[in-house]
Image: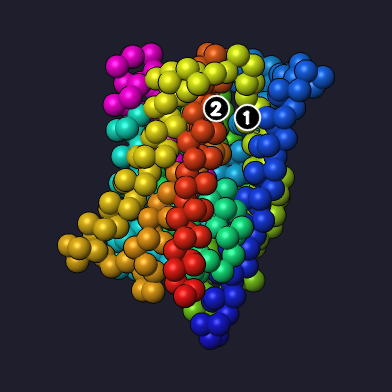
Amino acid sequence: MTRRGQHSALRDFLHSEAAGGIVLIAAALIAIIVANWPATAHGYEALLHLRTGPILAPALGPMTLHLWINDGLMALFFLLVGLEIKREFVDSRLASADRRRLPFIAAAAGMAAPALVFLAVAGAEPALQPGWAIPAATDIAFAIGVLALLGSRVPPALKLLLTTVAIVDDMGAVAIIAIAYTESIRVAALAGAALAVVVLYVLNRRGVMRLWPYLLTGAALWLFVLQSGVHATIAGVVTAALIPIRPSPGAPDDAHSPLHRLEHALHPWVAFAIVPLFGFANAGVSLAGTSLATFAEPLVLGVALGLFLGKQAGIFGAIWGADRLGIARRPEGVAWGQLYGMALVAGIGFTMSLFIGGLAFADPARLEQVKLGVLAGSIASALAGAAVLIACGRRHAR
């Protein structure tokens, strides 16, 4: 198969991510409107906290619509994230060490710098320190959606780099969720989860290529993890890691590969339903009583500056340093101004930031501040990044 097929597959992926990102942007805007319109604000909150039952985990109590979205549907989101990570490492852009170097360096610095900025701003208050990871992750769909709106002003190589950095970024976010936001472990449930993992491993080793045994065992794993105290979405990533893949280097995805089939089946549902639904359920911040002084609150300011300043400093600084030191080279044909614009856009943390914020703080008042910080930092990053990329696009068009 020619490289043309590979490029076509990449264009299809970016187009789908971009369209999903635009739908997510719309869902977030609708949530903010609904949460602040007097006729719908109460109904919005009541709907999210509607008890649907049953009690799947005693620590969570009766399942609500909000829990089903954040702990149930988002497990499918993380399943897709896990599938994309595995495909990248086995069959795509991160399959070789030289291709991994720049995305890993950029993503690592792009997670560390926002956390340090957050702690510098808000870390003096011990009660706020659990929020250190909120600005650390990039929302790939939202960011690619913004780049899509800029059209030909953004070279494909820049979209590719942002996508790759965001995928590595997702790996870090998954590790943070598993390690930093697990307060207590229930041994019996964890043992059940371990047994489910063993079953998945045996299925993989025996070459089972049908998807239903993996999905059925993955559902059991999700229930055990939900009851164990580890966040249930981790079950999605673990399941993805054990689903077989048939590599197809230099060609579009193998139609007989279980991983490729599941990824293609899941992607439209995640991009156009699950992630926008999550955005609608979590972005509805009430702006009543909000003033400029609100944005000076340590939690709001720490999250916003972590996303806006930390991300651009970490990612752009790491790429510049790696290139100057000869550790890894910037993409060919991409100007430094365009790389800076991409680093700004990477400050859009929306989905992952809201998700981690919900794990870090149980207090509704603090969650509202997290939402304000995420929205402020993400919007500032999107607008500034778009402005830089537009200016660079005009300069290169001359």
Distance CA(mark 2)–CA(mark 1): 8 Å
Q: Disc 2 vs disc 1: Cβ atoms closer than 8 Å? A: yes
Residue at far front of view: 398
Residue 282: which disc?
Answer: 1
Color theme of the render: rainbow
Residue 54 visible (yes or no)? no
List x then y, in percent, for residue 363: 53, 13
Q: Secondary structure at mark 2?
A: helix
How crowded is the residue under tag 1: few (<14 C-alpha within 10 Å), some, or many (20+)? many
The residue that disc 2 covers is 371
The amino acid at mark 2 is Lys
What's the residue at 62%, 24% (across, down)? Answer: 285
Residue 131 is a magenta residue:
yes
Q: Is residue 303 visible?
A: yes
Q: Position of residue 269 (x, y in %)?
A: 71, 50
Residue 294 picture location, percent across and down: 50, 18
- Residue in the picture at 48% in, 36% down: 377
> Seen from this angle, which residue lies furthest right?
39
Quadrant including the N terminus: bottom right
Residue 337 shows which numbered tag? Answer: none
Question: Magenta stretch mostly in which secondary structure?
Answer: helix
Provide the residue span drawn in magenta. Answer: 119-141
Circle 2 packing at 10 Å, graded few (<14), some (14-19), many (20+), is many
